[in-house]
Amino acid sequence: MNEQPIVFCKGGGCTAKLGPGALAHVLEKLPPFTDPNLLVGFDHSDDAAVYKLTDDIAMVQTLDFFPPMVEDPYIFGQIAAANALSDIYAMGGTVKTALNIVCFPEKMDLNILGRILQGGAEKVREAGGILAGGHSIADSDVKYGLSVTGIIHPDKVLENNACRPGDALILTKPLGVGIVCTASRVGQASDEAMEAAIASMTTLNKYASEALAPFEPHACTDVTGFGLLGHLNEMLAARCGAQLHWKALPHIPQALEYADEFLLTAAAQRNRNHLEGKVEFESTPFAVEELLFDPQTSGGLLVSVPADRAEEALAAVQALGLGCGIIGHVTDEHPGVIRVTE
Amino acid sequence: MQYQVNAMGKPCPIPVVETKKVLAQMTAGDTVTVSVDNAIAVQNLLKMAGQKKLAAESRTLASDHYEVVLALTEESLAAAQTPIAEEAPACIPDARAKGTVVVLSSDEMGSGDPVLGKALMKAFVYALTEQDILPDTILLYNGGAKLSVEGAPTLADLKLLESQGVEIMTCGTCLNHYGLTEKLAVGSVTNMYAIAEKLMGAARVVRP
């Protein structure tokens, strides 16, 4: 029997995220909650919420779900789960439990759902967590993700914006998965490029997080829908500036080629608009600019580490086998502005 | 020549991809007018225009209707050395006949010799592209589903029709039946409800 394909949504993965501008506008209007035990709430624009339970244990909570960005339901399940679990690792935490979040068309073959959930469950197991339940809704399009709870020591929370001037910036996965998936959607991506994107998206950030922990990073976030520049901008929190070297950016080589063919998402352009005036490009090719705004699904960790330990830290991440690099450093000059040069 | 691309309701990067196909056919002095339904698509088109050094202007017709007009310049011709299509297919601005639906329910035209029938069908779809008035929609079902998939002799012409705003819809059950689900290469997948709605709503149904 022929399998029914997943009915694709208009933009899969993290390209389907609401624009950062639109989101900030709505969140601003919500009443703030105050509780001394809430260590990280969403006023921080951080990756996950952290709530202190005891002096030794804080709970880390996050959820993430999105429409498919690849044809294979099993791989989609793996990617969606790796992406959701990533927020726990971006905080420096350990995964404990996960719940499935599912939207699925009633008339679609349930075997497809089975394979999505199987892919997701395997990633939860790999993360060392327990899949403890979930919730499913009949919907016109497929969407899948996880709500994840982890734990962390309250003193060891890795906030996304505690970088310090002089820190080196390490990126642990190659950029360009958004562009490659977009090219694939219009039939213009090579198998090789798509395989590289899938290998990157299905890799848990657990390994990079564990590899970097001994080097005492000051700040960490995962690069997802807002692109490298969007997440770096949040990390700088208008207190620090950053200097990036575009030649040092780990990336999927074909992504530059596809960017030059203008296979670009709406989300990347929204990211560009949102960061207007906050990024200065100097002799940077157009395709690299696009790479920097490209929304990443299950992207790598962006980690701010003490400069004197950067090389050693990079070697630890390199051992994991994905494209990674020291992409620049944090400055006390031009706070809130990211400069991109050769 | 003035070309049109109707990319209303199509997510990025489709507006850019469809516009690029038309740009490849354009020669000096031609323009293409692209209709899109969101401002971000306008920005992505202008970004491409900037890189390709095209002359570009955009206008807002409504909050969900924008037009971008692109023209080749000497600079863009020099920069890209745009290959000029040997015979650019005729393309009349929004020449779709309102309410005309073409139904292709077989990969053959007429009954008799199947080889002849297939050749006739290919010629018919090509002839459609040459019409002054284009259909609104082309429905492909049963054996017709073989016409819109990878490797089909009619694929290039159907893509050309789609780039001029003709809606190409292929029956999903039929694709599945012939094992072609993964091979659909133009237009969208549709279902019987939508097919019935299109046929009931048509002012004129053309069946070759």
Image (cartoon, coloured by chain):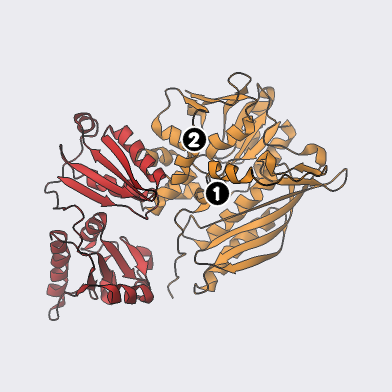
Chain colours: A orange, B red
**Which residue appears at 28% of the width and 45% of the height?**
B20
Q: CA distance from mark 2 to mark 1?
A: 17 Å
Residue type, numbered disc 2:
Leu
- Left or right, residue A337 beside residue B184: right
Give the image quarter of residue A318: top right
Q: Is residue A111 above or below residue B56?
A: below
Q: Is residue A215 above or below residue B33?
A: above
As drawn, which residue projects farthest toward the bottom?
B112
Q: In the rendered image, is residue A161 in sight?
A: yes
Q: In the rendered image, is residue B141 in sight?
A: no
Give the image quarter of residue B168: bottom left
Residue B71: x percent and y percent?
A: 22, 38
Q: Earlier in the sequence, mark 2 or mark 1?
A: 1
Q: Is residue A100 above or below residue B63?
A: below
Q: Nearer the viewer, residue A212 or A161?
A: A161
Q: Which residue is mark 2?
A: A292
Q: Nearer the viewer, residue A254 or A276?
A: A276
Chain identity of mark 2: A
- Left or right, residue B3 beside residue A230: left
Residue B22: x percent and y percent?
A: 23, 47
Residue A90: x percent and y percent?
A: 67, 42
| Quadrant of the image containing the N terminus of chain A | bottom left
Q: Is residue B61 above or below residue A123?
A: above
Disc 1 secondary structure class: helix
Disc sitting over residue A272 in the figure: none
Q: Which residue is mark 1?
A: A201
Residue type, numbered disc 1:
Met
